[in-house]
Amino acid sequence: MTLAVQALRQAGVEAVLCTGAYQGCGAFIRTARDRGWTAPISNVSFVGSEAMLSLLLRQGQASGRDYTQALVNSQVVPSYDDVSLPGVVEYRALMERHNPQVPDALRDSRQALEVLSFRSLEGFINARVIVEALRRAGPNPTRTSFRQALESLKNFDLGIGAPLTFGPERHQGLDSVYFTRVVNGRWAPITDWAAAVKA
């Protein structure tokens, strides 16, 4: 990681976009900040935002450094804390009611369990889309009827403030991207970009 940070810094890079799992991206961020590099660092939603943040906060407590300054993550769903959205309210209520658990064999004991997360909200939204497509496909769905049912979804309201639309030539249902930064140890929507990228 040190060589990558040195090379990017010497090249005059003004911002970094990381794509990877939380361990590698977290290590890069830690190394950059430990070496005094304060350039904005961004991750795409794939990273596992909550796990990476947990890792960075633990490392920050141990070292006395703030590894979350100028850290931006994109998300493909709105914040799971935005209770102004009916879809988020439903997701939170179902998570509380059913309290899903990760099987011990799949659990990383070094990571705290995520009660709510961007990933599980995304999974909830995906499940709602599949359920609606199955409903539209009828009692004996086939591959063809299921695909046609998905492609029939036009301006489908998921309760997240962005309607979903599929079609024969459109297989990406949502186009919104939500940008977040760390505020008080939690991911929060970015409302002020100057503050979000300030070191």
Image: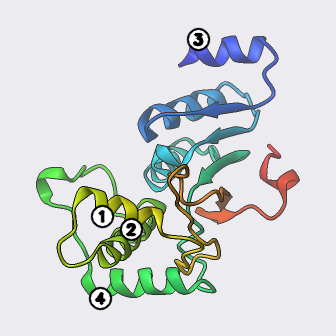
Q: Name the residue under label 4.
A: 97
Q: Are marks 1 and 2 in contact (CB under 8 Å)?
A: yes
Mark 1 surroundings: few (<14), some (14-19) or many (≥20) residues within 10 A: some
Marks 1 and 2, how far apart at CA: 6 Å
Mark 4 surroundings: few (<14), some (14-19) or many (≥20) residues within 10 A: few
The front one of 195 and 119 is: 119
Marks 2 and 3, how far apart at CA: 50 Å
Q: Mark 3 points at which residue?
A: 3
Q: Name the kind of residue labelled 3 in the image.
A: Leu
Marks 1 and 4, how far apart at CA: 33 Å
In the picture, measured across the screen, residue 37 lies left or right of residue 134, that is: right
Q: Name the residue under label 1.
A: 145
Q: Name the residue under label 2.
A: 149
Please tell me whether mark 2 or mark 3 is closer to you in this view: 2
The front one of 98 and 183 is: 98
* Sequence-first disc among 2 and 3: 3
- Residue 18 vertical placement versus 175 (above, below): above
Please tell me whether mark 2 or mark 4 is closer to you in this view: 2
Q: Name the kind of residue labelled 4 in the image.
A: Arg
* Sequence-first disc among 3 and 4: 3
Please tell me whether mark 1 or mark 4 is closer to you in this view: 1
Mark 2 surroundings: few (<14), some (14-19) or many (≥20) residues within 10 A: many
The front one of 167 and 180 is: 167
| Location of the C terminus (image quadrant) | top right
Residue 34 horizontal/vertical position (percent): 63, 30
Snapshot quadrant of residue 16? top right
- Residue 6 vertical placement versus 112 (above, below): above
